[in-house]
Image: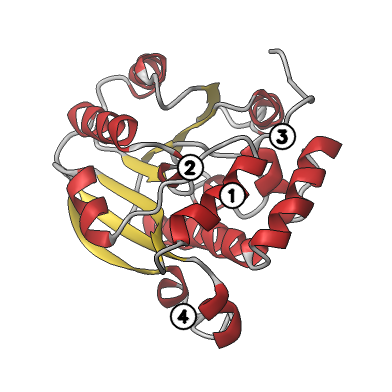
């Protein structure tokens, strides 16, 4: 796989602000500039990561056996593989760095696999998923930390095809950002552009419509999910152009 280190990658920027080591100087420079616009970005990144861990714990308690995780990043300590060690998990990411290191991290886990996938063109992902899961299509889908980087058309196509792929009893966990204030989208995209991407804040109502025919069961702020109401100070929260919510939807 070819790794382009001349331009920042949003996944590697995310890895850097979480304290990871699988990033390059170009990613670290981009993160420095992003923090000038969104100084609370590391806190939101941590909340997003902790939401993955909460979901992993809940799925473990529910006896989930099959997981398809989208835009996984690195399956290091505290990822779904830690909470569901016996489950069959298919991880995926567009970033070749994540895929290469992910494959190494999972080398001794025959029940887990990592594939490279562009969620805007998901046919190869579904081919890999069909091979991996076989006839078992009751699946828990991790869609955390990605749809706010995808436009409506690609998001709608992905979740509808995912719904068609899965069967009744499947579940999906998803996080998204909600705009706060008239200039929210402009500020968020000013930061996102530094990582070479674009962001798409959405209201809970817009998100629920976008993920149909999945049925939203619970939707609330990540700080509420995690019982961390004071994780951001009131001043930090008021200054943030967005809130971050998590939802659970059923097939």
Mark found first going from the N terminus, 1 or 2: 2
Note whether residue 5 is visible.
yes
Mark found first going from the N terminus, 1 or 3: 3
Secondary structure of the residue carrying numbered label 1 = helix
Q: Nearer the viewer, residue 117 or 183?
A: 183
Specify the quadrant that holds the C terminus. Answer: top left
| Mark 4 neighbour class, 10 Å CA radius: few under 14, some 14 to 19, many 20 or more | few
Compute the Cα span from label 4 to label 1. 30 Å
Compute the Cα span from label 1 to label 2. 42 Å
| Mark 2 neighbour class, 10 Å CA radius: few under 14, some 14 to 19, many 20 or more | some
Mark found first going from the N terminus, 2 or 4: 2
Residue that label 1 marks: 190
Compute the Cα span from label 4 to label 3. 33 Å
Q: Tell me the mark number nearer the camera, choosing from 1 and 2.
A: 1
Rendered location of residue 204, percent (x, y): 27, 61
Mark found first going from the N terminus, 4 or 3: 3
Question: What's the residue at 50%, 66% (across, down)?
Answer: 241
Q: Is residue 21 left or right of residue 98?
A: right
| Mark 3 neighbour class, 10 Å CA radius: few under 14, some 14 to 19, many 20 or more | many
Question: What's the residue at 33%, 54% (across, down)?
Answer: 202
Q: Relative to 111, is 18 above or below?
A: below
Q: Which of the numbered marks, if any, corresponds to residue 8?
A: 3
Secondary structure of the residue carrying numbered label 3 = loop
Q: Which of the numbered marks, if any, corresponds to residue 86?
A: 2
Specify the quadrant that holds the N terminus. Answer: top right
Q: Quadrant of residue 88?
A: top left
Q: Is residue 74 left or right of residue 174?
A: right
Q: Which of the numbered marks, if any, corresponds to residue 6?
A: none
Rendered location of residue 83, percent (x, y): 52, 54
Q: Tell me the mark number nearer the camera, choosing from 4 and 1.
A: 1
């Amino acid at each position: 796989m070819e790794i382009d280190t001349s331009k920042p990658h949003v996944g590697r920027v995310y890895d850097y602000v979480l304290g990871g080591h699988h990033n390059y100087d170009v990613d670290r420079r981009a993160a420095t500039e992003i923090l000038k616009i969104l100084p609370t970005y590391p806190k939101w990144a941590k909340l997003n990561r902790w939401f993955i861990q909460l979901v992993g714990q809940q799925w473990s308690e529910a006896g989930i056996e099959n997981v398809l995780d989208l835009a996984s990043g690195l399956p290091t300590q505290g990822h779904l593989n830690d909470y569901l060690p016996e489950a069959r998990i298919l991880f995926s990411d567009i970033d070749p760095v994540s895929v290469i290191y992910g494959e190494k991290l999972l080398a001794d886990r025959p029940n887990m696999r990592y594939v490279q996938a562009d969620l805007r063109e998901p046919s190869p992902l579904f081919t890999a998923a069909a091979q991996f899961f076989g006839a078992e299509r009751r699946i828990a889908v991790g869609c955390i930390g990605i749809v706010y980087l995808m436009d409506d058309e690609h998001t709608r196509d992905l979740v509808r095809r995912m719904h068609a792929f899965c069967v009744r009893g499947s579940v999906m966990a998803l996080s998204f950002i909600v705009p706060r204030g008239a200039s929210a989208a402009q500020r968020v995209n000013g930061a996102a552009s530094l990582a070479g991407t674009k962001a798409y804040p959405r209201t809970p109502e817009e998100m629920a419509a976008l993920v149909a025919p999945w049925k939203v069961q619970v939707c609330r702020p990540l700080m509420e999910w995690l019982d961390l109401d004071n994780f951001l100070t009131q001043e930090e929260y008021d200054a943030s152009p967005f809130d971050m919510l998590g939802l659970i939807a059923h097939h």
